[in-house]
Amino acid sequence: MPPSNIVEGPRVATWHCPSCRESVPRLLPNGSANRVTLPPERTMLPDDDIRAACERVQGLRAPEVCYACDQAFQELLGTLVRPPAEEGDARGEPGLNDTGVVGALVPLAERGTQLLIFNVIAGELRCTEIEYLTDFDPDRLTYPGSRGAIAPRIWELYERHLAELHAGSDSPL
């Protein structure tokens, strides 16, 4: 039981985030809304093949996600990914030829967010995996020290995305 000198504050209504499928508060502790509108550039890398793959994903798109999902989108988009069965830790080592990239995150209303993972097959960028964000294993994310054997197109997307992130950063690195 709380002490008698504490007055209970107002309750904050919740809403259901379509991305994480969690019941989250409508307001953040600072009073701002816990809903973030997602423009396409925040959900997919700028590439025609990636855009075409996103258009093929079936389902009603969710126009807004919670703040936590928005932050996760920023961290995941453009990140390099190891194949599902690969063991070990590739960070700091040269990249491998089976390394893919998270090319898009597609938030679907009432179904969650799908990650579209791309690899280069026979010289073409293709969506090789579609996985729900809640099922994705974060141990698959990798940050190789050098390109190594990673397909040039994957490495180009990765480096371009990193350059855009650093160009938009307010803090000096």
Image: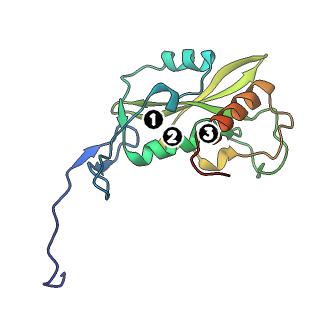
- Comparing labels 2 and 1, the label whose residue is closer to the camera: 2
**Quadrant location of residue 66?**
top left
Q: CA distance from mark 2 to mark 3?
A: 13 Å
Q: Is residue 117 above or below residue 123?
A: below
Of mark 1 and mark 3, the one earlier in the sequence is: 1
The amino acid marked with disc number 1 is Thr
Secondary structure of the residue carrying numbered label 2: helix
Is 100 on the left or on the right of 113, as rendered? right
**Quadrant location of residue 63?**
top left
Q: Which mark is residue 165?
A: 3
Residue 29 x/y as whole percent: 31, 59
Q: CA distance from mark 1 to mark 3?
A: 22 Å
Residue topped by disc 2: 73
The amino acid marked with disc number 2 is Phe
In the image shown, does 80 or 57 lie closer to the viewer? 80
Of mark 2 and mark 1, the one earlier in the sequence is: 2
Secondary structure of the residue carrying numbered label 3: helix
Residue 89 x/y as whole percent: 76, 52
Whether residue 43 appears in this view of the structure is no
- Comparing labels 1 and 3, the label whose residue is closer to the camera: 3
Q: Residue at x 64, y 42 (%)?
A: 166
Whether residue 58 appears in this view of the structure is yes
Q: Residues within 10 Å of mark 2 (few under 14, many from 20)?
A: many
Residues marked 2 and 1 touching at CB (< 8 Å):
yes
Residue topped by disc 1: 113
Q: Is residue 55 above or below residue 148?
A: above
Q: Residue at x 78, y 48 (%)?
A: 90
Of mark 2 and mark 3, the one earlier in the sequence is: 2
Q: Is residue 159 above or below residue 140?
A: above
